[in-house]
């Protein structure tokens, strides 16, 4: 049977959910799945620190190699993130080892129980009571192991942390010096896998874009953290660095209003570059046709059924999960994003992600042994 998306994925990077993708990292590191695609230092080391640099795409690392000498000399290459290429979905896939269709966190914002849930802030539009994190995402992190999670202290009690890091051993940091030291202490205590997360690259990209000097300065700062970790980790331990997604630069006029399509919806969600449109009753076909006519030359435009049938978010979506996806999905091909009137401040973002372009979908997976004596 011919796929409904045959011929419509030109230029897209499909997530390698059965191989080298962020969703496969934890199962491979824990010995559940084949680890042949993991860089050699992480395969052979006695212990591994898995370091997630939010927002660092593989293409950005290649283009800014001079700013990131530590990362640029590590062993490895590019793997894919998941679809949508966004923090909430990808971090949940890293932690659980599952595709978004399986764990159910389908983006930055999604429709849950008839309300749009902001998954990172764990709030619902209009200020109502958000759902219990367990009811949205029920899988434990790290295949049920109590893996140390070295991340920002302020994330400790958030709904998103409860949803995607359930079962992990939370170890909070306030500064990057503490991040480095706490990772070293967990390894010294005998931990075989430590997970750590740094959000700075993504935060700077969204605020300043990818063409401001502060972007290059932040890349150098993140690379310095990598060097500090290598300096304190013993030679029997490997540092394995990856990311949840890459970035696309957005100008002020990159944000495209879609009021004609909005008139056919009850809500919008997703990310600006992977926008979900929820159709008014009986308007699904009309909305899809109008979206293809208006935006088909600038975006991949799919129905919910096409996305699920093609497995772009993985397979096995059950229960309420399919309904969290928009009736129509707009995945930007050009460096643009689509305005959601319910989130007016989103248009201030100077970078975006979520779609299937190489800049967003390809992320590094590089490793090196620690440099401190064993």
Image (cartoon, grey):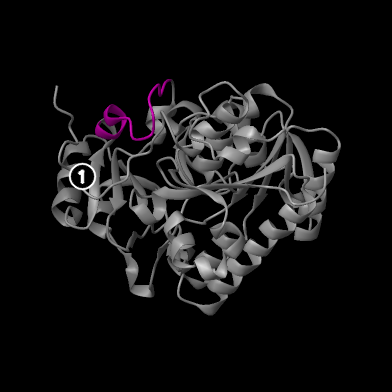
- Seen at 50% across and 24% down, the residue is 34
- Seen at 44% across and 59% down, the residue is 247
Q: How many marks are shown on the rendered structure?
A: 1
Instruction: Report whether 163 appears left or right of 47.
Output: left
- Seen at 42% across and 29% down, the residue is 101
The correct choice, above or below, for 94 with respect to 72 in the image is above
Instruction: Report whether 359 appears left or right of 348.
Output: left
Work out whether residue 244 can be spotted: no
Depth check: give the residue in front, 29 or 144.
29
- Seen at 72% across and 35% down, the residue is 47
- Look at the image and give the residue range highlighted in magenta: 306-318
Magenta span has 236? no
Depth check: give the residue in front, 273 or 147.
147
* Disc 1 element: helix
- Which of the 4 image quadrants contains residue 26? top right
The correct choice, above or below, for 75 with respect to 337 in the image is above
Magenta span has 309? yes
Dominant secondary structure of the residues highlighted in magenta in the image: loop
- Which of the 4 image quadrants contains residue 295? bottom left
Disc 1 crowd, CA 10 A, few/some/many (<14, 14-19, 20+): many
Work out whether residue 72 can be spotted: yes
Residue carrying label 1: 287
The quadrant of the image that shows the C terminus is top right
The x and y percentages for residue 95 are: 60, 34
The x and y percentages for residue 2 are: 14, 27
The x and y percentages for residue 345 are: 48, 65
The quadrant of the image that shows the N terminus is top left
Depth check: give the residue in front, 169 or 41.
41
């Amino acid at each position: 049977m011919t796929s409904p998306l045959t011929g419509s994925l030109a230029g897209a990077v499909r997530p390698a959910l059965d191989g080298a993708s962020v969703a496969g990292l934890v199962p491979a590191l824990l010995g559940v799945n084949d680890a042949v695609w993991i860089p050699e230092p992480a395969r052979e080391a006695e212990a591994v620190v898995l370091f997630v640099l939010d927002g660092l795409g593989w293409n950005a690392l290649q283009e800014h190699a001079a700013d990131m000498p530590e990362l640029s000399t590590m062993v490895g290459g590019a793997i894919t993130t998941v679809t949508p290429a966004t923090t909430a979905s990808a971090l949940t896939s890293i932690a659980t080892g599952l595709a978004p269709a399986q764990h159910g966190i389908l983006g930055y914002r999604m429709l849950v129980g008839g309300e749009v849930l902001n998954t990172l802030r764990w709030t619902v539009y209009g200020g109502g009571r958000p759902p219990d994190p367990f009811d949205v995402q029920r899988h434990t992190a790290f295949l049920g192991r109590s893996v140390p999670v070295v991340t920002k202290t302020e994330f400790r009690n958030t709904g998103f942390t409860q949803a995607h890091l359930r079962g992990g051993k939370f170890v909070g940091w306030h500064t990057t010096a503490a991040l480095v030291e706490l990772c070293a202490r967990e390894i010294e205590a005998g931990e075989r896998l430590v997970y750590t997360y740094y959000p700075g690259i993504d935060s700077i990209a969204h605020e300043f874009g990818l063409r401001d000097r502060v972007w290059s300065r932040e890349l150098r700062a993140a690379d310095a953290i990598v060097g500090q970790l290598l300096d304190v980790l013993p030679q029997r331990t490997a540092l394995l660095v990856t990311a949840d997604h890459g970035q696309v630069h957005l100008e002020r006029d990159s944000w495209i209003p879609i009021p004609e399509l909005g008139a056919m919806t009850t809500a919008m969600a997703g990310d600006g570059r992977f926008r979900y449109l929820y159709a008014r009753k009986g308007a699904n076909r009309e909305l899809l046709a109008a979206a293809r006519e208006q935006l088909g030359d600038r975006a991949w435009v799919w129905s919910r059924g096409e996305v699920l049938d093609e497995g772009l978010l993985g397979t096995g979506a059950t229960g309420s999960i399919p309904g969290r996806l928009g009736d129509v999905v707009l995945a930007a091909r050009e460096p643009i994003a689509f305005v959601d009137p319910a989130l007016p401040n989103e248009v201030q973002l100077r970078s975006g992600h979520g779609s299937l372009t190489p800049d967003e979908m390809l992320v590094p997976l590089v490793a090196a042994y620690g440099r401190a004596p064993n």
